[in-house]
Image (cartoon, grey):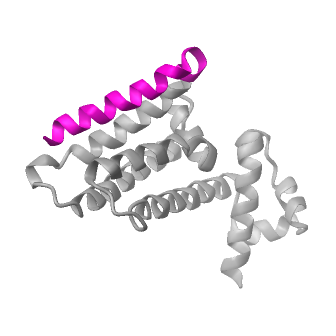
Amino acid sequence: MEKDKKKQLIRAAVKRFEKHGIKKTTLDEIARDLRISKASIYHYFNSKEELYHSTLEWESMQFIDELNNINSTLELTAIGFINKYLEFKESLNQKYFLIYRVVLSILQEENFEKEDIFINNFLKSEEETLAKLLATFNVNKKDFPESFSSFLVKQSWGSLLANKLYNKSKPEENLKKKEMFIQLIESILI
């Protein structure tokens, strides 16, 4: 029961933090959303910042779970899987907005030590998960060097941010860019 209440708090906080950001969100608002007292929040979290970091951790676990499930229902080739992975990442700013916002803070140089630690741990987790998933394909080991998953994760983040620029100026080029990236990956695997 305690776990359920904590999860409920985190979910309500995610909605508030996504809508208003950490600075404008108050614990009073989160408590009001759940029809509980502010003191009830302090039973689980020592501060708004601790709650915020818990929401980031929760979102990252959801993200990794969804990443793990990309290939679970479909029989994909390695290229097909990478394509699905890139599609998954393209929707990140809608599904996992807090993670997206923290990564953007790198560009704005607004992140703090805890956010830096979160980003490093999150990217490492994404790379490790992707490496495990890629290892399931019947592809020669030399085709996926150890650094390939790191390359793919970083490039997919760069691509996600570049998509924003393409969508503002020339949306039709966005598809071409994705096709070029897949062709690049295919040339690495051949």
Instruction: Name the side, left or right, on which 130 lies relative to 20.
Output: left
Residue 83 spot, x, y in % from top left: 37, 45
In the rendered image, which quarter is residue 46 located in?
Answer: bottom right
Q: Which residues are magenta?
A: 165-190
56 falls in the magenta region: no
In percent of the image, x 72 and y 47: which residue is there?
17
Q: Of 76 and 131, which appears nearest the observer? A: 76
In percent of the image, x 59 and y 38: which residue is there?
101
Q: Residue furthest top?
A: 169
| Image quarter of the N terminus | bottom right
Residue 153 spot, x, y in % from top left: 35, 43
Q: Of 119 and 178, which appears nearest the observer? A: 178
Q: Of 73 and 61, which appears nearest the observer? A: 73
In the rendered image, which quarter is residue 18 located in?
Answer: top right
Residue 89 spot, x, y in % from top left: 48, 44
Above or below, comparing residue 49 to residue 133 in the picture: above
| Image quarter of the C terminus | top left
Residue 23 spot, x, y in % from top left: 74, 39
Above or below, comparing residue 15 to residue 20 in the picture: below
In percent of the image, x 69 and y 63: which residue is there?
10
170 falls in the magenta region: yes
Above or below, comparing residue 147 to residue 128 in the picture: above
In percent of the image, x 87 and y 60: which residue is there?
33
Predominant secondary structure, magenta span: helix
Q: Residue furthest bottom?
A: 1
Instruction: Name the side, left or right, on which 23 lies relative to 78.
Output: right
Q: Of 17 and 184, which appears nearest the observer? A: 184
